[in-house]
Image (cartoon, rainbow, N blue to C red):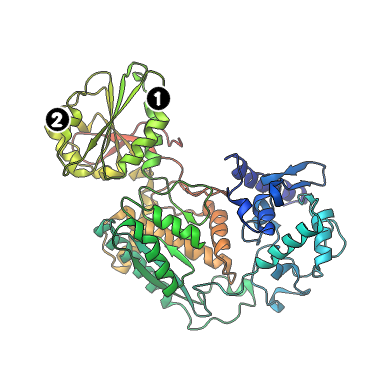
Amino acid sequence: MKAPTIVRTLAALCALSLGAVSAAGEPAQPQASAVPIGESIYRFGALPGGEPLRGERASGVPVEGASAACVNCHRRSGLGAAEGRGFIPPITGQFLFHPRVSSRDDSDLPYVDGARINRDPFTEETLARAIRQGIGAEGKPLSVLMPHYALDDAEMAALVDYLKHLTKTQVPGVSDSVLQFATIITPDADPVKAKAMLSVLDDYFDEKNAAARAVSPRLRSYHKMMFRATRKWRLHVWKLTGPANTWEAQLQEHLAAEPVFAVLSGIGGKNWAPVHHFCEQAELPCLFPNVDLPVVAENDFYALYFSRGVLLEAGLIAHQLQEQPHWSAVRRLVQVYRADDIGAAAATTLAGESHRSGLEIVRRVLRAEAGSGLSSALKDIGPGDDLVLWLRPKDLAALGNHPVKADGVWMSGLMGALEHAPLPSAWRSGTHMAYPFDLPDKRRIRVDYPLGWFRIRKVPVLDLQVQADTYLACGLLSETLNHMVDTFVRDYLIERIESMLEHRIITGYYPRLTLAPGQRFASKGGYMVHFAEPTGAKLMAEGDWTVP
């Protein structure tokens, strides 16, 4: 790659990061004023008193506020970023002030792409010059992408102190011989799915540890050591109990007793929010849990999900509803769901995305046991109505006692068991299903990889989608750690997953996975489908893959 191409590529990378901030119209974290001055400058582009950080690139282009924050290019960890053959170098104190090293094999620094070890170390004075004037430690101009910032002495001292603080010496859950991980099971999780997830995790950890050496030596040569298994993985299963308002306290106790590097997979039922909030507050990566109602807080950092679950389904349904020829004649959009289930949140999302003048949005809430209450919910449904079902299999099976009278019927695939949904034949051919995965025929080859591994390891297939997602999460973690080598920093783990995810070929149920900075959901779209015949599980797509 030629130098101008590298510059353009890195400029695009920075622009992508800046877009992730400005798209929301606010800094990545709204509490910037509550953090120390150096952190506020670095992460939020905010000076003391709330004034915006201002800078100017070598080309004369000004940057200001959140768009000027160091985090946009150097990332939250301070360990930089890579794109193609171009790098934004690490700027933690560990790298900035380290004496010159002639080769990586002679370095005691952890391995980071783009680290410049064969140069003079910065001093506080030369670092201040670099930030203000764009002049490096050896007196040469820095990259044209690096803005020049107007900081006074107190602000500069605070920023330099923060860069020193970014150096991590002791990371919880990491030793010379073991990496500690946890998985979390909420009390409302489906026990069969929980067992399915654990069967994959247990066997994956066993296989990983079979090749690991007892003690890891210092990694001197990146090229020789990158893909060698050197540490054992240890899994802690944190099973929560009781009401949701006690879960965060339980998790704090678990983390104090069993410090871990990250949470891997996990499974929830109707409420994952306390787990999400705990991981965010503890700055603990939570990687791809099996949940159908994740927390949508794209400004949060530590939780990564495969998709938005039923909230994505609501977007898919809203998109198709508005494409229907009869949509202009519809009087009502009637949504049916159980009061204590995730369909309530999905119905709220769909109502917000489907609002238009003159359309009455009606909610029919079922409160008795599964299979009951449908008569009153459906009794006045007729022409002029569109009906959306956020129901579980028992309720879907009970629809056989009721005729189809709505102009159109839509349903949640995730809640209804996807292609195994027990829809009665009268409802089967005319119901549109939201399907946030690749179609069965299209994903078959990708799913064959975990299926083959399950056969070899004698892992019983209890829930293929949960187990394929869990296997995928394990593989993503393993590959990311291989590339991190010996740089065990929690923020860096998240950043490396973001950068490498789109290059993965085997993606299980999903046609493609991508995460840009600021994005927390790796699969962005899905299909609308219907059953091809009154019996059987074959699905027919009603259009292309759609990102609502």
Q: Is the residue 331 above or below the residue 97 in the image?
A: above
Query: Image quarter for residue 366?
Result: top left
Q: Is residue 499 visible?
A: yes
| Front position in the image: 388 or 355 | 355
**Residue at x 26%, y 43% (from the top left corner):** 416
Amino acid type of the residue tagged 2 in the rendering:
His
Q: Secondary structure at mark 1?
A: helix
Which one is nearer the viewer's eye here, 89 or 34? 34
Mark 1 = which residue?
Answer: 322
Horizontal relation, residue 40 to residue 151: left or right: left
- Image spot of residue 143 (x, y percent): 79, 53
Q: In this image, 283 relative to 470: left or right?
A: right
Residue ranking furthest to the right: 139
- Residue sitting farthest toward the front: 49
- Disc 1 versus disc 2: distance between alpha carbons? 26 Å
Q: Is residue 180 left or right of residue 482?
A: left
Residue 47 seen in the figure = no
Name the one closer to the observer, 466 or 238.
Answer: 238
The number of callouts visible is 2
Looking at the picture, how far across and down is residue 515, in whole percent?
53, 49
Farthest left residue?
401
Q: Assess disc 1: are there few (<14), some (14-19) or many (≥20) residues with their C-alpha within 10 Å of its C-alpha.
A: some
Which mark is drawn over residue 310? none
Q: Quadrant of the C terminus?
A: top left
Residue linked to disc 2: 402
Q: Is residue 29 left or right of residue 256?
A: right
Looking at the image, which is closer to me, 179 or 351?
A: 351
> Residue at point 40% right, 40% down?
312
Residue type highlighted by circle 1 = Gln
